[in-house]
Image (tube, helix red, strand yellow):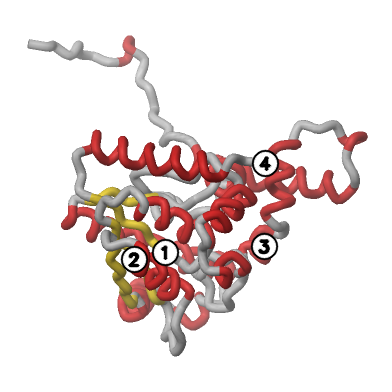
Amino acid sequence: MIKEKKIIKHIVSWLKKYIKKSKLNGFIVGISGGIDSSVTSYLTAMTQYPTIVLEIIIGKKKYKTLSQKHAEFLISKFSNVRFLQKDIDSLFDFFCENIISNISQNKKNKKNMLALANLKSRIYMLILYYYANINNFLVVGTGNKIEDFGIGFFTKYGDGAVDIHPIADLYKSEINILAKELNIIREIQEAKPTDGLWEDQRSDEDQLGANYKDLEWAMINENKQNNFVSKKEHRIIKLYKKLHKKNQHKMISIPVCKIPFCLKQEKIKIT
């Protein structure tokens, strides 16, 4: 069992030390109504530094979103929190109509559907960094350990483009424990994880083919011998390894082609 109170204190202290060293003014967090972004935004608010929570609206909403409810919850507790909500429908539609030919047909194509989902995430990143730049804020990542370093379940240069990762060393199950300790809205705690980027509102489990509990187990036990695991466990480990390998390019530094010294014609002179 994790020591949730001490972990919360440790993360808040780490955030305060980091921003003080960076000489920036505050934090901005993209909130989705999910448990990871809710916990992350609560922790940044606890630093007492100015914190913007930003929700991106995709598609017309006739009801109060979980992000709105969480923002109201934060504002009721912290005077340093400000809520922004931006609708990207027109921007997204403009891209589709002007860049993609035969958009109605392409939207049905599996690869193009994924590209469009990733596009939404990258538009989100542009807006986060715009507000971060004009306020001199840090963009805070909301990914957890299994997503960011296990299966690479994020958009490269989208929600993966951040300045700091306060919860990326915690598994999803551990985030759930922190959410309970922080008294995050129960509706958020019980919501099915989803990235909100798909028109059919598919869940993370729908996309991954397994739930986070099983994938966490596989991340910890991936090197177990076949004769020590059940058929289901073997399938989960196999799936985990497949996802990890497929998304490895997201989790490593950008490869740089190193030129051998003997191939360089001129030496760099330092004066």
Disc 4 to disc 3, how far (Cα)? 25 Å
First along the sequence among labels 4 and 3: 4
Q: Position of residue 112 (x, y in %)?
A: 51, 68
Disc 2 to disc 1, how far (Cα)? 6 Å
- Determine whether the residue tagged by mark 4 lies in a helix, strand or loop: loop
**Location of residue 229 (image quadrant):** top right
Q: Which-is-in-front pick, marks 1 and 3?
A: 1
Q: Position of residue 45 (x, y in %)?
A: 35, 55
Residue 205 numbered mark, or none: 3
Disc 4 crowd, CA 10 A, few/some/many (<14, 14-19, 20+): few
Disc 1 to disc 4, how far (Cα)? 27 Å
**Amino acid carrying mark 1 in the image:** Ile
Residue at (51, 76) in percent of width and height: 107
- Residue, disc 1: 31
- Residue, disc 4: 1
- Closer-to-camera residue (180/170): 180
Residue at (41, 75) in percent of width and height: 68
Residue positioned most to the bottom: 62
First along the sequence among labels 2 and 4: 4
In the rendered view, would you say 233 is above or below 256? below
Residue 230 left/right relative to 91: right
Are the residues tagged 2 and 1 within 8 Å (C-beta)?
Answer: yes
**Amino acid carrying mark 2 in the image:** Leu
Q: Which-is-in-front pick, marks 1 and 4?
A: 4
Residue at (60, 55) in percent of width and height: 176
- Determine whether the residue tagged by mark 2 lies in a helix, strand or loop: strand
Q: Is residue 257 visible?
A: yes
